[in-house]
Image: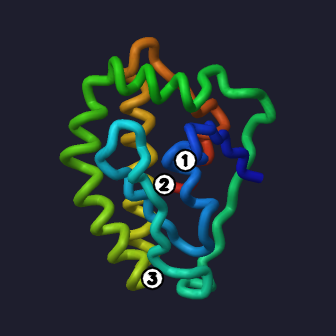
């Protein structure tokens, strides 16, 4: 189950960037736009659900507890205090997106998995250098990552 938080702004529904994954089937890209109010942010379907029909995604719920830091307040704090966020957004993500689109287009699981894991790891580093630090993963999460890497 995926829980999404939406906020109502004037005549538009607006959610977090990750909410775009729920607007279409298959693989979806978030085009964040340039407007400060997010009005030009949009979801674009890269490929439909039949493109990579033998790919199976598993979601492991490792805790039923509510997160200590909500995504909304965590992102606000990260934008305000993380010295790595701008570097990630401006330097790393644009190239990674192009590589990810290529991996998806070619159904290249090895590249897809490597890029996904690297992006997740980097996201959590950005969270760790936020003030105060944000810890979204727990010991179980770390053990699962260790098993996947092995």
Q: Earlier in the sequence, mark 1 or mark 3?
A: 3
Note whether residue 47 is visible.
yes
Q: Residue furthest top?
A: 132
Task: Give the residue displayed 60% in from the left and 70% down from the top.
Answer: 24
Tell me which residue sits at (35%, 20%) in the image. Answer: 80
Seen from this angle, which residue lies furthest right?
A: 64
Marks 3 and 2, Cα distance to the nearest angstrom? 20 Å
Q: Which mark is residue 107?
A: 3
Circles 3, 2 touching at the beta carbon (< 8 Å) = no
User: Is residue 101 toward the left or the right of residue 6 in the image?
Assistant: left
SS assignment at label 2: helix
Q: Residues within 10 Å of mark 1 (few under 14, many from 20)?
A: few
Report which residue position mark 1 lands on: 145
Asked if residue 111 lies left or right of residue 98, the reply is right
Q: Residue at x 21, y 44 (%)?
A: 90
Using the numbered discs, state the Cα–Cα distance from disc 1 to disc 3 in whole angstroms: 22 Å
Element type at mark 3? loop
* Image vertical order of residue 24 relative to residue 52, above or below: above
Q: Is residue 4 above or below residue 64?
A: below
The residue labelled by disc 2 is 149
Q: Position of residue 119 (x, y in %)?
A: 39, 50
Q: Earlier in the sequence, mark 3 or mark 2?
A: 3
């Amino acid at each position: 189950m995926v829980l999404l938080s939406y906020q109502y702004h004037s005549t538009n529904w607006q959610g977090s960037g990750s909410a775009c994954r729920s607007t279409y089937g298959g693989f979806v890209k978030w085009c964040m736009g340039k407007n400060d109010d997010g009005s030009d942010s949009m979801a674009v379907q890269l490929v439909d659900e039949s493109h990579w029909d033998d790919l199976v995604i598993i979601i492991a719920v490792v805790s039923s507890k509510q997160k200590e830091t909500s995504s909304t307040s965590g992102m606000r704090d990260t934008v305000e205090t993380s010295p790595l966020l701008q570097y990630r957004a401006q330097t790393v993500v644009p190239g990674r997106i192009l590589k990810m689109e290529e991996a998806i287009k070619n159904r290249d699981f090895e590249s897809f998995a490597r890029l996904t894991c690297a992006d997740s790891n980097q996201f959590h580093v950005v969270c760790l250098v936020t003030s105060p630090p944000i810890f979204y993963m727990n010991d179980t999460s770390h053990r699962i990552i260790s098993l996947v890497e092995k």
